[in-house]
Image: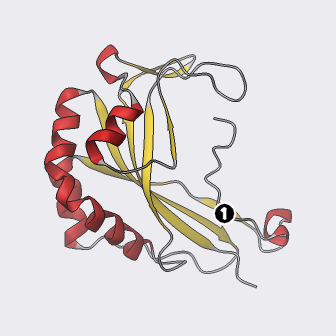
Amino acid sequence: MEYTNSYTYFGIDSRGVIDHRGLVATAKGRFDPQAITSLLRLQPFRSHAYGEQRKNGSIFLFSSWSAVRSSAGRLDAEAQCLEIVRILEDKIAMLRKIKKQYEVSFSLVIVPSIHGEEPPLLRFPEEVIRFCYETGTEIEVDMYIYPVDSPVAMQGRGDTDGMDGI
């Protein structure tokens, strides 16, 4: 049975400084995720605002909005990136406006979970590079690597992003 997979998503996060508490947003970077949802007319699968309480009781010191998740082609990050870029293509002007209004960073996050098998293809066609250039989007790879016989692989690890405690 194949366990290796990947998914990709688009994220907007506060810019700020890193100190002993982690990322602390600048005043201008403390955006309301609902405002981003309204502006882009896209529903996030995960978001939080500066000052909201985490599951562990601490407080978020930055805002975050994550949406447009793709699992197209289990091992094809290129197809996933293309799917996301094509959904966001007509929102480039709005993304630029958001970046001008708030101190935020945009990221195209690729999350491969490799279980001792073939890794996903990481290739970025011109369409993806152009979108990233026009919007100032960074490409991030958040990789999880497991041996084939690890307990996670044996349990058939599902699509998670490793951020359950955040």
The image position of residue 5, as x and y in percent, is 60, 72
**What count of labels does the image hold?**
1
Q: Nearer the viewer, residue 20 or 66?
A: 66
Left or right: 86 as drawn, with respect to 67: left
Taking 101 as reference, is 35 left or right? right
Kindly identify which residue carries mark 1.
145
Q: Position of residue 128 (x, y in %)?
A: 25, 66
- How would you rate the neighbour count of disc 1 (Cα within 10 Å): few for under 14, some for 14-19, many for 20 or more? few
Q: Residue 159: x, y in percent?
A: 64, 63
Task: Kindly identify the amino acid type of the residue bearing the numbered disc 1.
Answer: Ile
Residue drawn at 60 percent across, 19 percent down: 59
Going 22% across and 36% down the picture, which residue do you hit? 98
Residue at image location 51% in from the left, 49% down from the top = 45
Task: Please tell me whether residue 16 is drawn above or below residue 162 in the rendered image.
Answer: above
Pick the residue in front: 20 or 90: 90
Q: Is residue 110 left or right of residue 2?
A: left
